[in-house]
């Protein structure tokens, strides 16, 4: 009888432990949106972007891509001034229409890196790191150079 009680107690503790730690593990699966933090006088935007990857380095590279992608195609929400910032590329299905250009643009080590960098040149993750069983989610504060990005898109005849 003691063995059965001990077995039930151990199973109960394991179930309770799994319930406590389950909340921590789902953080990596939550979808975080890129947010506008500030607009600089030179046209550069300070954004908070999140990325997911198998390790911290991959997640940070994905955050860079997500920041540029959102500026190009989705626009940003300015929570401070309650005004949305329009996407740079307004053409419907532009990502698919200019598929060849944007596939090259967003490949690892691609041209998107020219238009985004960390605020103040810091090398560490500035907004946080969340880990699940399968992936890491990192958030960073980045500067996106809008004038330089617009110049590139005009040169490629993607925007007017």
Image: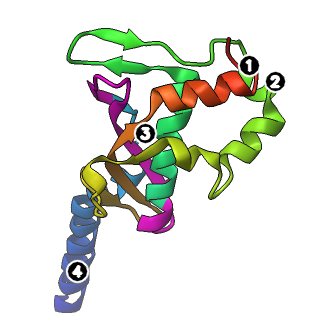
Q: Is residue 147 magenta?
A: no
> How far, Cα to Cα, is label 1 from label 3?
22 Å
List the residue tagged with mark 3.
31
> How far, Cα to Cα, is label 1 from label 2?
6 Å
Q: Residue at x 26, y 73 (%)?
A: 14
Residue 134 in view = no
Give the SS element for disc 1: loop
Residues under numbered marks 4 and 3 in contact, where contact means CB atoms less than 8 Å apart: no
Q: Which residues are magenta?
A: 36-58
Where does the image place residue 51, in percent across and percent down from the top left? 45, 49
Nearer to us in this view, 104 or 28: 104
List the residue tagged with mark 2.
97
Q: Nearer the viewer, mark 1 or mark 3?
A: 1
Q: Nearer the viewer, mark 4 or mark 1?
A: 1
List the residue tagged with mark 1.
93
Q: Is residue 64 above or below residue 10?
A: above
Q: Residue at x 39, y 62 (%)?
A: 132
Q: Nearer the viewer, mark 2 or mark 3?
A: 2
Q: Earlier in the sequence, mark 2 or mark 3?
A: 3
Where does the image place residue 158, in percent across and percent down from the top left? 72, 21
């Amino acid at each position: 009888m003691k063995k059965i009680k001990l077995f039930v107690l151990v199973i109960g503790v394991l179930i309770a432990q799994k319930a406590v730690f389950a909340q921590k593990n789902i953080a990596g699966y939550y979808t975080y949106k890129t947010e506008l933090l500030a607009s600089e006088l030179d046209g550069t935007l300070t954004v908070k972007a999140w990325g997911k990857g198998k390790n911290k380095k991959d997640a940070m590279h994905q955050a860079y891509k997500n920041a540029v992608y959102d500026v190009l195609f989705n626009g940003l929400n300015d929570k401070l001034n309650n005004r949305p910032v329009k996407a740079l590329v307004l053409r419907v299905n532009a990502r698919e229409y200019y598929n060849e250009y944007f596939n090259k643009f967003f490949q690892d080590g691609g041209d998107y890196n020219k238009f985004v960098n960390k605020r103040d040149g810091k090398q560490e993750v500035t907004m946080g790191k969340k880990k699940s069983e399968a992936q890491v989610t990192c958030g960073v504060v980045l500067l996106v150079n809008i004038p330089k990005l617009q110049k590139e898109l005009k040169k490629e005849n993607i925007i007017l």
